């Protein structure tokens, strides 16, 4: 999965004495509103995530510490620079999906880019205090934004969502879906965001009912995965069909929902997602 980056060592603990070196990875994201994933990332022209040595004349104050990888501190560049205006100047803007699929970028850097993107969105969306409208400042002692006027402290919010393998034990089949109206065309599972006031198990039951009209029971935890593109912590469950296997598909959400035997399960093209991991676990007889 995307967050499984051994033997690399990722540490996102906040520090205000981060060390900038020529090898520090520098993440830069576009601010414009894009229909897909809200922004684009800057790569070097030879399709690398830039390092500090790729830039000249960067003001240290415009760099915000993100996290540490293998002993190297990584930063977010929060200023637009003239060299980003044209592709001839050494950098290119690429969609986040493109970045994730560039084979030259090591897999662990895909995870770093996704995590950096989540932090970028958080900083960008909290430039102003939601309570009094004043401009916020960075805290020096923790990962937080502070409103100097009303004193509000803003911490990153992580959004829980579930992905669910519904299994019909009688027929030994799993329910697979395909999303409606999205670029992602591969098989997936019932999934959705947790509502306020809801437990994760209630989310599982509600999403199963809303998307497929199926009742489920014996809900078991499988694993979790940070999915920073949409600020998620994805929580994976598997459960059993409770009663009728007749599917009433939510056509707005799904273009397909159907039962598949273990042999019939077609996996996603990469092993990045928890959803694919759950599908694979069924295919291989582990759940
Ligand atoms: Zn305020």
Image: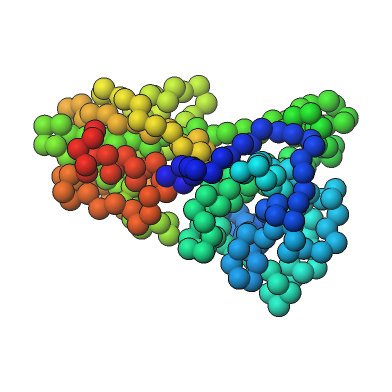
**Residue 26 coordinates in the image, percent (x, y):** 70, 54
What colour scheme has been applied to the protein in the rendered image?
A: rainbow
The residue lying furthest to the right in this view is 149
**In the figure, residue 184 lies in which quadrant?**
bottom left
Q: Image check: 146 left or right of 282?
A: right
Q: Residue at x 66, y 32 (%)?
A: 13
**In the figure, residue 67 lies in which quadrant?**
top right
Number of labels in the image equals 0
Q: Is residue 133 visible?
A: no
The residue lying furthest to the bottom in this view is 88
Q: Is residue 24 above or below residue 217?
A: below
**Residue 264 coordinates in the image, percent (x, y):** 17, 50
Q: Image check: 24 left or right of 220?
A: right
Q: Quadrant of the C terminus?
A: top left
The residue lying furthest to the left in this view is 171
Q: Residue at x 77, y 48 (%)?
A: 20
**Residue 97 coordinates in the image, percent (x, y):** 51, 59
**Residue 160 coordinates in the image, percent (x, y):** 50, 32
Q: Image check: 283 left or right of 55?
A: left
Q: Is residue 243 visible?
A: yes
Q: Residue at x 83, y 58 (%)?
A: 58
Q: Residue at x 51, y 64 (%)?
A: 104
Give whichever of 79, 104 is nearer the camera: 104
Q: Quadrant of the N terminus?
A: top left
């Amino acid at each position: 999965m995307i967050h499984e980056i051994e033997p690399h060592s990722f540490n996102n603990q906040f520090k205000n004495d981060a060390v900038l070196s020529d090898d520090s990875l520098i993440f830069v994201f576009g601010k414009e509103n894009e229909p897909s994933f809200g922004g684009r990332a800057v790569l070097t022209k030879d399709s690398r995530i830039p390092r500090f040595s790729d830039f000249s004349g960067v003001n240290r104050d415009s760099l915000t510490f993100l996290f540490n990888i293998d002993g190297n501190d990584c930063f977010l560049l929060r200023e637009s620079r003239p060299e980003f205006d044209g592709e001839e100047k050494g950098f290119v803007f690429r969609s986040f999906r493109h970045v994730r699929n560039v084979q030259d970028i090591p897999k662990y850097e895909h995870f770093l880019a996704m995590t950096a993107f989540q932090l970028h969105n958080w900083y960008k969306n909290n430039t102003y205090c939601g309570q009094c409208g004043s401009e916020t400042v960075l805290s020096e002692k923790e990962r937080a934004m502070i409103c100097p006027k009303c004193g509000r402290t803003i911490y990153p919010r992580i959004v829980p969502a579930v992905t669910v393998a519904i299994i019909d034990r009688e027929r030994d089949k799993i329910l697979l879906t395909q999303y409606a109206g999205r670029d992602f065309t591969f098989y997936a599972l019932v999934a959705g965001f947790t509502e306020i006031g809801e437990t994760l198990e209630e989310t599982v039951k509600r999403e199963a009912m809303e998307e497929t009209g199926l009742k489920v029971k014996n809900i078991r935890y499988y694993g979790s995965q940070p999915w920073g593109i949409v600020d998620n912590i994805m929580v994976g469950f598997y459960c059993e069909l409770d009663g009728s296997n007749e599917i009433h598909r939510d056509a707005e959400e799904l273009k397909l929902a159907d039962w598949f035997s273990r042999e019939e399960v077609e996996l996603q093209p990469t092993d990045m997602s928890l959803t694919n991991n759950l599908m694979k676990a069924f295919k291989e007889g582990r759940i």
